[in-house]
Amino acid sequence: MRIDVNQCAQLLKDNDNILILTHAHPDGDTLGCGFALCRALMKLGKICAVINSDVIPKKYNYLFDDIAPIRFKPGYVVAVDVATPNLLGDLNGQYHIDLCIDHHSTNTEYADNLLLEDTPAACEIMYDVIKALDVEIDSKMAGCLYTGLTTDTGCFRYASTTAKTYRAAADLIELGADNGTINRVMFETKTKTYARLERMALESMEFFENERVAVITVTQDMYKKTGSNEQETEALAPLTRQVEGVEIGITIREKIDGTCKASLRTFETVNAAELARSFGGGGHNQAAACRFDCGVAEAKAKLVEKCGELLK
C-alpha cells in the first residue's frame, strides 16, 4: 500500500523493536538513510538497529561509529533504499518487511510503501520523514542524511538533482553536516588498493556500437593482483560515462562463484532502468544495475546486444 510521509512517520511512532535493512553492496544513500533513521528512532526511545548482508566499507564508519550494536527480536522491519527484496543479498527472505522507504521507479511495492520516484536520493525522503517524527536533527544525523544526498547525486552534478535537494543539503549543513570532509572522503580519497584496481579497470575498457557503449570488466583475478575487493568498486561505474561520446557505460564485476553484476550509467538519451529490467534488474533512469547467473563474457555479449537495440 502506498503511504505518504506523515503516515510513514506515524507507523514508526506506533512500533518498536525496529530492524532497518539496507541493500547489499551498500552505498552512501542506503547507509545514510538507515543510520539517520536509527538515530532518530533512538531519540524517540525506541530499540532499533541497522543491518547489511555485506561488510560495510570503512569510509562509512563515521555514520555509525558511536552506535553500540544490540540484539533484539524484531517487531517491525523497515527497508530503506531497497527497490526489491532480492537486493538485500543474504538477508533476502529472512524477514517479513513491514515498511519500505524508497525512490526507485522499479520498486516492486512489497510492503507499506513510501515511494517518491522523482526524488534523487532516498535520504531526501528520509529528511522529511524525520522532520515529521518531530525529532531534533543533530550533527551526526545531518551527516548521515547529507551523505546520501551527495553520493546519489554525484556531488550534486547529476540532472536528477532538484532545487529541493539543494535546499535540503543547505539545511543539513546548517544543522552540522561536515560537507567538506564528507565530499572529500566520498569523491576525492582513494585507497592504494583501489587506485591499483582503477588503473587495471580502465585498461580493460572496451568500446562498442560506434564507441557509444563503454564496458569495464572487473575480475576476481584483478582483486587478487591489486589487493582490492568488491567493496571498493563503487567509484568505478561513473568512469565509463566520463568518456566523450559514450552514451551507455557498463561496469561488470565478477563474483566469487563466477556469476557477475553489472552497474549501468547512461545519459538522458538512454534509460538505464529499462536496460537493467531486460535482465531482471532495476534502478534509476541514468543509474541502474542487474545480475547475471553466467560468466563475464556471456553477460557482456548480452548487454552489448541490448544496448545496440536501445541505441537504434
Image (tube, rainbow, N blue to C red):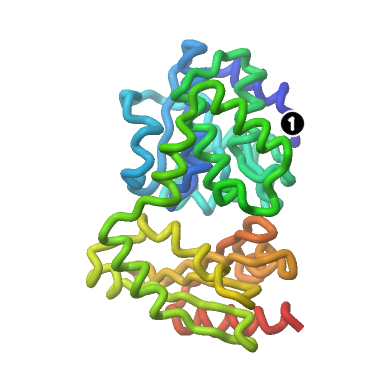
Query: 227 above or below 94?
Result: below
Tell me which residue sits at (57%, 71%) in the image. Answer: 249
Amino acid type, mark 1:
Ile
Query: 34 above or below 9?
Result: below
* Residue 35 seen anywhere in this rendered image of the structure: no
Residue lying farthest to the front in this orientation: 180
SS class, disc 1: loop
Quarter of the image for the C terminus: give it.
Answer: bottom right
Q: Position of residue 268 (x, y in %)?
A: 73, 64
Residue lying farthest to the bottom in this orientation: 210
Q: Label 1: few (<14), some or many (≥20) within 10 Å?
A: some
Q: Is residue 312 left or right of residue 129?
A: right
Tell me which residue sits at (54%, 72%) in the image. Answer: 250
Residue that badge 1 annotates = 3
Tell me which residue sits at (31%, 44%) in the image. Answer: 58
Q: Position of residue 66 (x, y in %)?
A: 33, 24
Nearer-the-camera pick, 306 or 136:
136
Q: Is residue 179 left or right of residue 72?
A: right
Query: 223 above or below 3?
Result: below
Tell me the quarter of the picture where residue 235 sits. bottom left
